[in-house]
Image: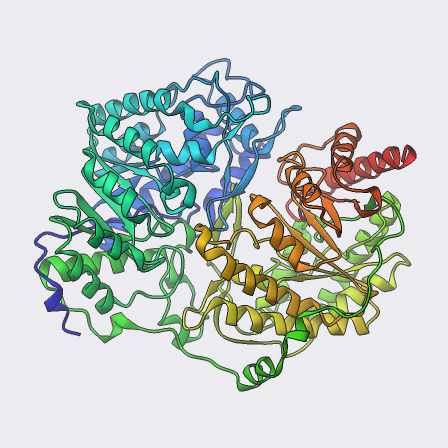
Amino acid sequence: MDTSQATGGGNVRSTVHGYPRIGPRRELKRAVEAYWKGRRTAAELDTVAAGLRTDAYALLKGAGVDDLPSNTFSYYDHVLDTAVMFDLVPPRFASPASAADRDEELRRYFALARGDRGAPPLEMTKWFDTNYHYLVPELEPGTRPRLVGDKPVAEFREAAGAGYRTRPVMVGPLTFLLLAKPADGAPEGWEPVELLDPLLDAYAELLADLRAAGAEEVQLDEPVLATDEGRAATKHLERAYRRLGALADRPSLLVSTYFGSIGADALRVLKDTPVEAVGLDLVTDSEGVDDLVKVSGLGSTRLVAGVVDGRNVWRTDVPAAAATLGTLLGLADELTVGTSCSLLHVPVDLDAETSLDPELRRALAFAKQKAEEVALLGRVLSQGAGAGPEDSASPPSFTDARVRARLDALGPEAAVRPGERGVPADTPLTTTTIGSFPQTAELRGARAAHSRGEMGREEYERIMREEIDRVIALQEDIGLDVLVHGEPERNDMVQYFAERLDGYATTEYGWVQSYGSRCVRPPVLYGDVFRPEPMTVEWITYAQSRTRKPVKGMLTGPVTMLAWSFVRTDQPLGDTARQVALALRDEIADLERAGIRHIQVDEAALRELLPLREERRSAYMDWAVGSFRLATSGVAPTTVIHTHMCYSEFGQIVGGIEALDADVTSVEAARSRMELVADLGRRGYARSIGPGVYDIHSPRVPSAGEIEESLRLALEHVDADRLWANPDCGLKTRGYAETEQALRNMVEAVRRVRAVL
């Protein structure tokens, strides 16, 4: 198209909602973990963080972005930062003795996330429908928000001192309260949103401080408006932004929404408040423009149009985006080009990926490239700059006729398990783990050396087998009932399989933050998926040969393989999930033929991909459940199918968990105090359940008594012959000393409970 037709917007500026905080080589991860281990001081950690922030400002300015965000950096999580800033911290976490004691301040901050000295951490769950995790604030009626921190002000001043004018970004008050949960002991029926008015007082004080520091605009993120709960809270939305908008002593306000459209009602409310700008996600679905038409445009309220995808890695079709923006010029007096959400969810820089297939690489854009796209679109609209053919690259199309023919030939019976199944264990409270064991530096080094060609296959396999021997022997000594091989050969539960499946590509530096210092490298799913050869059979059968106890085969399910990848957009997700399921079905068949009778297919992300709107969930659950059952239904009745899910709000998918028809479902439950077990019990769930009895994302080792208490709580809802005992999740991020002690405590707790059954 001739992009000059999409001009006429005057000075159209460009911005991004946020930028990756981890650094191009995970510098933040290494600095934080060194601080935890006592190898860095607080001052050294702060110096690394300041350098990463300044580098991000320089990169965005160099990319041509006009308006830069600040306060998008966090040592662990931005929701946690907000809770700490407003002193919304549970009393079990003692306040620092001195506000000037930086080490004590950081110790308390990280204790909230990881637990410390007998204080369990805050619950952790998924940030909307992403793989980022946030810490859930715990609030109660007596909570009184008050401004005790100055992080947004300090980072604004830091940026200004380096020569960058920025827009401080914060979690909006409505999103913060709707994501919080009532603390234990709060009256039944009380909801955190009842604290809106006192929280607005604290926000008002912060806005005044930011204005005094020289901030001209502040961004308040309200992604909760893309959910049904948020859409139903328009009364609170109106109260919040009429009040904040009416403040005399404040910067301009940008209320930013993302992860989907917010509906005409919420948009109309924002339009009618005194806020100066509204940010809309115009990528996730097609309703955002329709909403603008329904409210007759935004008039004098500036529109920040999110037309560059902040969650996937495909390049923006610049001519098509420019055409959309040209349409929007008639729906707002002033327009800013932006991303659909923060770039937190994509890797930092595609320039580092020199080994990708050139055709595929031309179709990709990481955070740096997306910033350049935003800036280009701003120039297209405001200056009439042209966009050439290179600005409209489409993902390459890779299809496999064999895969499509096999799927077309499958009937509905392929997703139904034949025969009658019994109880999958003959021991009450069967003990197991989720899959991985600690990944030592030696293991990581061996994998890296083998990958670089510096270690031969024979030596590599010897090291892996020795680790499997160690893990099997340790589990037998501890007294676990169903064992795992520990996954020493796997770098990541998705990447490992992506490296062995046609249709996937993996990156070298494409890291994305999952939670805290935990980063993942999501692969790129660009074509039809096919399994050329068995992926796990050799390792699992070796482990099984080392013990008489059953060893679980360990696979990652089709939904999770999609959720934790950057997925092609040229066909429905359900079609791609069925292709992955077919590959897994073949792997399961090979495991079963090799004599493996317990096979775990993890669907850790089943809740994560659940649409934010109720009206879209049924269609999602149909293909999500269908793909899992396609993968797992070819086995004999005597083969035990396990699945695992972690760190999500499971209440909304209880029906889906039942429909998976797995024999044993293990779930995160320690931080949520067995909430899902109670939900399943009320529904009469008939299969076996393994609620996580201790939190592996904390270095804290629970006592046998604590685990015993969790088991007894679970037994209030599940019969003992259907209850399994296991950790919350895989153990790869933990050390061996804490892992061994925690597992021994778990087995001892089970022994005590069994003794009185």
- 374, above or below 176, in the image: below
Taking the image as shown, residue 388 lies to the left or right of residue 140, namely: left
Taking the image as shown, residue 547 lies to the left or right of residue 535, namely: right
Residue in view at x 44 percent, y 50 percent: 612
Whether residue 38 appears in this view of the structure is yes
- 628 vs 54, nearest the viewer: 628
Residue 510 in the image: x percent, y percent? 46, 58
Furthest toward the top, the residue is 97
Residue in view at x 52 percent, y 83 percent: 400
- 723 vs 621, nearest the viewer: 621
Residue 379 in the image: x percent, y percent? 15, 59
What colouring style does the render use?
rainbow
Whether residue 52 appears in this view of the structure is no
How many numbered badges does the structure rendering display? 0
Residue in view at x 81 percent, y 69 percent: 419
Taking the image as shown, residue 574 lies to the left or right of residue 323, namely: right
Image quadrant where residue 738 sits: top right
Furthest toward the front, the residue is 683
- 388, above or below 610, in the image: below
- 4, above or below 311, in the image: below
Residue 539 in the image: x percent, y percent? 76, 66
- 536 vs 284, nearest the viewer: 284
Q: Quadrant of the C terminus?
A: top right
Image quadrant where residue 596 sits: bottom right
Q: Quadrant of the N terminus?
A: bottom left
Residue 670 in the image: x percent, y percent? 67, 36
Taking the image as shown, residue 95 lies to the left or right of residue 286, namely: right
Residue in view at x 18 percent, y 38 percent: 276
